[in-house]
Image: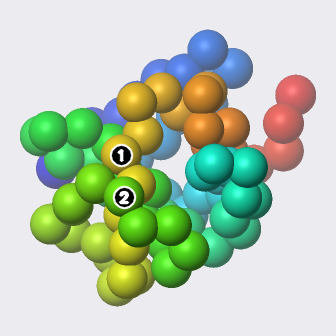
Amino acid sequence: MSGYIIVSNKMSFKDGDRITCVIDNNKINDAKLTIAPNGWFACQNVMNGAYCRDKKGYKHSWFVSSLKACNVIKVGVREF
């Protein structure tokens, strides 16, 4: 799926972006974002959560209700 998500800190995300995130107090440094018709998912090998069809080669996916709530940061982009 194409498209961008604009978050409050003015960073844009697209399907397949490498991200870091925090899921249930677990910091995950190796993850990718999947943007699907039914939501956004952090695909990674640590936490098993909601089903996502395209896990980007990872074992697990986690439904991301809010990029800010899961502390999602795009890899390679410095925070301001």
Residue 18 lies in what quarter of the image?
bottom right
Residue 14 vs 71, above or below: the answer is: below
Residue 30 lies in what quarter of the image?
bottom right
Label 2: which secondary element: loop
Q: Quadrant of the C terminus?
A: top right
Say which amino acid is labelled 2: Gly
Q: Residues within 10 Å of mark 1 (few under 14, many from 20)?
A: some
- 26 and 74: which is toward the camera: 26
Query: What residue lies at 84% left-to-right and 36% top-to-bottom?
Result: 79
Query: What residue lies at 60% left-to-right and 38% top-to-bottom?
Result: 70
Q: From this viewpoint, is residue 69 visible?
A: yes
Residue 10 is situated, as x and y percent measured from the top left of the image, at: 63, 21
Label 1: which secondary element: strand
Residue 56 is situated, as x and y percent measured from the top left of the image, at: 33, 75
- 48 and 7: which is toward the camera: 48
Residue 58 is situated, as x and y percent measured from the top left of the image, at: 40, 81
Residue 56 vs 52, above or below: the answer is: below
Say which amino acid is labelled 1: Phe
Residue 59 lies in what quarter of the image?
bottom left
- 24 and 53: which is toward the camera: 24
C-alpha distance separating marks 2 and 1: 7 Å
User: Which residue is identified by label 1?
Assistant: 63
Residue 45 vs 2, above or below: the answer is: below
Q: Residues within 10 Å of mark 2 (few under 14, many from 20)?
A: some
| Badge 2 or badge 1: first in the primary sequence | 2
Mark nearest the camera among 2 and 1 is 2
Q: Residue furthest top?
A: 8
Q: Using residue 61 as the reference point, say whether residue 8 is left or right of it.
A: right
Query: What residue lies at 71% left-to-right and 68% top-to-bottom?
Result: 29
Query: Disc 2, disc 1: CB below 8 Å?
Result: yes
Q: Using residue 5 as the reference point, say whether residue 50 is left or right of it.
A: left
User: Which residue is identified by label 2?
Assistant: 49
